[in-house]
Image: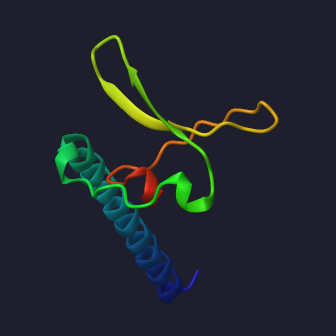
Amino acid sequence: MNKRIVLLIAGAVIVVAMAAGWLLMTTRSQAIGTLTQSVDTRPEVQVFPSAFGLDYEEVLVESADGTRLVGWYIPSQNGAAIIAQHGTSRTASRC
């Protein structure tokens, strides 16, 4: 095989490996930051289901370890239930 082609392939492999390593480290550091982020720094909820003409109730679920999860219950017309969770560093109005 031509020496130039081998060098190009090796360079491409190195670039891809470096990009993958950067992506993994960025994701890891973001995950750590999210886990240690104070809930107080999250933005306030600005949009509620009523803005879309939906009736809702605020609900609170407390886990065995005392963690409090707050959400909305929106009654369905067909008895179906969907549980959606917003992403980290987000609120229910910014899913």
Looking at the image, can residue 37 be seen?
no
Nearer to me, 61 or 3: 61
Residue 35, relative to residue 67: is it above or below?
below
Q: Position of residue 52 (x, y in %)?
A: 60, 60
Please give the name of the residue rendered at 37% of the width and 17% of the height, measured from the top-left corner. Answer: 63
In the rendered structure, the answer to whether residue 93 lies left or right of residue 5 reads left
For residue 38, which quarter of the picture? top left
Nearer to me, 6 or 64: 64
What colour scheme governs how the chains and residues are painted in the rendered image of this protein?
Answer: rainbow
Residue 6, relative to residue 27: is it above or below?
below
Q: Position of residue 20 (x, y in %)?
A: 40, 62
Residue 3, relative to residue 54: is it above or below?
below
Counting labels gives 0
Outermost bottom residue: 4
Outermost top residue: 64
For residue 26, which quarter of the picture? bottom left
Please give the name of the residue rendered at 32% of the width and 53% of the height, measured from the top-left corner. Answer: 89
Nearer to me, 36 or 42: 42
For residue 14, which quarter of the picture? bottom left
Nearer to me, 71 or 32: 71
Looking at the image, can residue 54 be seen?
yes
In the rendered structure, the answer to whether residue 87 lies left or right of residue 68 reads right
Please give the name of the residue rendered at 34% of the width and 67% of the height, measured from the top-left corner. Answer: 18
Which quarter of the rendered picture does the N terminus lie within?
bottom right
Q: Position of residue 27 (x, y in %)?
A: 34, 55
